Image (cartoon, rainbow, N blue to C red):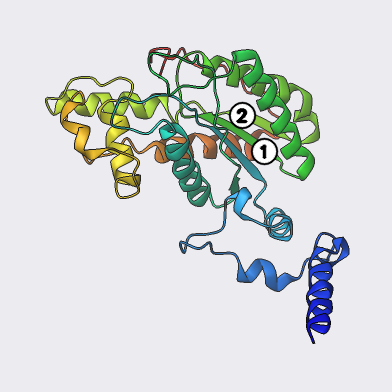
């Protein structure tokens, strides 16, 4: 009896592991229809939460814009977790993809240019050259996958905008003749931060830099009940958290839609995607 049970279990396991069973199985239309909504009830737009048949079906349905959003791992004061950039980035890029309706949010890149510190041990960073190489590689991988538009964005300041713009320009020149375009969207972070700073000043709050009011407010809004912020330490933070957000997704959606609209009206375009100088301090 035990041998029979063992044999059945072994056969079941081999069946699950057989490569031809799932890895090469033809996509069934019902799969994409059934799983078009994610576990939270939102449209299924996150690449890392999709299966390959779902990605294939989404591309065929017109979701041919890949959104690459970089986060970052760094200290954000004693009250905010070190992965704040990544946590906010994931929520932001998903919101952008949903509002666009024709895009898929690619996995957030968790490391960006920065330098570690033994005094404030929360930062792990890349160099600008490494970031450029990574963005170029994953953008071209997305193109190979079947995406026709690639948008690069970042939840960070410093010298990164220049890196994004240079990579986008390089790939645009390489692929535009094939009807494939790569853009750098600079309004998702810089402009939203400036709008938030203006709101703070208008309401009697000081301008807030790294790990300050904007960061803490957004992290409280998105993950205040998930341990993103040590609420008991807020009294030691600079300024008071406020509920209003900078609406990063709204700024980015408009800019991306403008990029895509220009393709329809001008055909083969050559847009100068140079970034505006970022006024944020190098560690933000």
Q: Is residue 183 above or below residue 282?
A: below
Quarter that holds the C terminus: top left
Vertical relation: 194 (above or below) 255: above
Residue 163 position within the rendered picture, expressed as x and y whole percent measured from the top left: 59, 16
Q: Residues within 10 Å of mark 2 (few under 14, many from 20)?
A: many
Q: Which mark is residue 183?
A: 2
Asked if one can make out residue 187 in the rendered structure from this viewpoint, the answer is yes
Of 259 and 12, the residue lying toward us: 12
Residue 149 in percent (x, y) is at 67, 38
Residue 241 visible, this orientation: no
Whole-percent x, y for residue 207 in the image = 23, 19
Please provide percent x and percent y for residue 119. Answer: 38, 13
In the image, taking residue 85 as reference, residue 125 lies left or right, namely right
Question: Which of pointers 2 and 1 lies earlier in the amino acid sequence?
Answer: 1
The extreme front residue here reads 2
Give the left or right position of residue 177, taking residue 259 as reference.
right
Q: Quadrant of residue 53?
A: bottom right
Task: Kindly check if marks 2 and 1 are in contact, taking CB atoms under 8 A apart as contact.
Answer: yes
Q: Residue at x 27, y 25 (%)?
A: 212
Q: Give the left or right position of residue 203, taking residue 248 as reference.
A: left
Measure the C-alpha gap from mark 2 to mark 1. 8 Å
Q: Secondary structure at mark 1?
A: strand
Which image quadrant: the N terminus? bottom right
Q: Nearer the viewer, residue 2 or 47?
A: 2
Q: Which residue is mark 1?
A: 149
Give the residue displayed 55% in from the left and 52% down from the top.
101
Q: Is residue 103 above or below residue 3?
A: above
Find residue 181 and report its image quarter: top right
Hey, which quadrant is residue 88 in on the image?
top left
């Amino acid at each position: 009896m035990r041998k029979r049970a063992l044999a059945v279990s072994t056969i079941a396991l081999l069946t699950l592991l057989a490569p031809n069973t799932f890895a090469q199985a033809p996509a069934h239309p019902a799969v994409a229809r059934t799983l078009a909504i994610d576990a939270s009830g939102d449209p299924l737009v996150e690449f890392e939460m999709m299966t390959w048949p779902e990605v294939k079906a989404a591309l065929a349905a017109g979701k041919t814009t890949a959104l690459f959003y970089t986060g970052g791992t760094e200290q954000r004061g004693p009250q905010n977790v070190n992965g704040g950039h990544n946590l906010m980035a994931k929520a932001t890029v998903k919101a952008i993809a949903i509002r666009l309706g024709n895009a898929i949010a690619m996995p957030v890149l968790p490391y960006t240019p920065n330098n570690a510190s033994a005094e404030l041990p929360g930062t792990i960073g890349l160099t600008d050259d490494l970031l450029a190489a990574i963005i170029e590689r994953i953008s071209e991988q997305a193109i190979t996958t079947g995406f026709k538009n690639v948008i690069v964005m970042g939840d960070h300041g410093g010298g990164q905008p220049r890196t994004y713009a240079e990579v986008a320009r390089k790939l645009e020149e390489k692929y535009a003749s094939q009807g494939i375009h790569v853009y750098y969207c600079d309004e998702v972070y810089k402009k939203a931060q400036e709008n938030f700073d203006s709101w703070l000043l208008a309401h009697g709050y000081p301008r807030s830099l790294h790990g300050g009011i904007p960061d803490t407010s957004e992290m409280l809004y998105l993950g205040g009940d998930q341990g993103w912020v040590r609420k008991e330490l807020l009294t030691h933070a600079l300024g008071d958290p406020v509920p209003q957000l900078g609406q990063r997704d709204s700024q980015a959606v408009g800019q991306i839609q403008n990029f895509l609209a220009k393709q329809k009206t001008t055909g083969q375009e050559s847009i100068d995607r140079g970034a505006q100088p970022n006024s944020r301090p190098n560690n933000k």
